Image: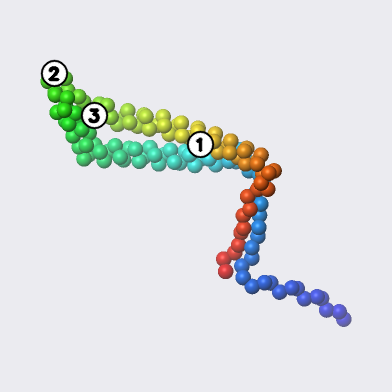
Amino acid sequence: MASAPAAAPRPAGPRRARLLVTRLDPWSVMKTSFMLSVSVGIVLLVATALLWWTLDVTQVFSTIGRTVNDIAGSGTTSFDFLSLVGFSRVMGVALVLVAIEIVLWSALATLFAFLYNLSVGLTGGLEVTLSEDA
């Protein structure tokens, strides 16, 4: 009776796999970058609101307004700094900037995915090594 050949022993240490990223799907890159930029935009809006609230509570806006009035000489007119940096105006500007950021990041990420796909023919792609934990 013939015995089956023994399997080669597994080498010691973690297993490793070398992979080449040869193509990025532009549609997937666009969806992912859109979702990431929306989340960054939400964080920026919340941070802007918190910063404005903190500056308002600590009376920074009224202090700046009083300082400008003292420097300019508040004879006939008074400078209202709070109307210039009101919450609705600041949040409106922040919302416009966030909208521009979302469109710009999504478009740039998609463009870079196309450019990466074109350059893979010259560079061979991005090599990634995956390994197990020991």
The C terminus - image quarter: bottom right
**Which of pointers 2 and 1 lies earlier in the amino acid sequence?**
2
Q: Marks 3 and 1: in contact by CB < 8 Å?
A: no
Q: Considering only vertical position in the picture, is 102 above or below 7?
A: above
Q: Is residue 89 left or right of residue 102?
A: left
The N terminus - image quarter: bottom right
Q: Mark 3 — residue?
A: 82
Q: CA distance from mark 2 to mark 1?
A: 48 Å
Taking depth in this image into account, of 88 and 10 the one nearest to the observer is 10
Rendering coords of residue 85 (x, y %): 28, 29
Q: Secondary structure at mark 3?
A: helix
Q: Secondary structure at mark 1?
A: helix
Rendering coords of residue 78 (x, y %): 17, 23
Taking depth in this image into account, of 11 and 124 the one nearest to the observer is 124
**Which of pointers 3 and 2 lies earlier in the amino acid sequence?**
2
Amino acid residing under circle 1: Trp
Residue 23 visible in the displayed image: yes
Q: Mark 2 — residue?
A: 76
Q: Secondary structure at mark 2?
A: loop
**Which of pointers 1 and 3 lies earlier in the amino acid sequence?**
3
Amino acid residing under circle 3: Leu
Q: Which mark is residue 105?
A: 1
Q: Residue at x 55, y 42 (%)?
A: 32
Residue 62 visible in the displayed image: no
Q: How is the image coloured?
A: rainbow
Amino acid residing under circle 2: Thr
> Where is residue 17, by image quadrant?
bottom right
Residue lying farthest bottom? 1
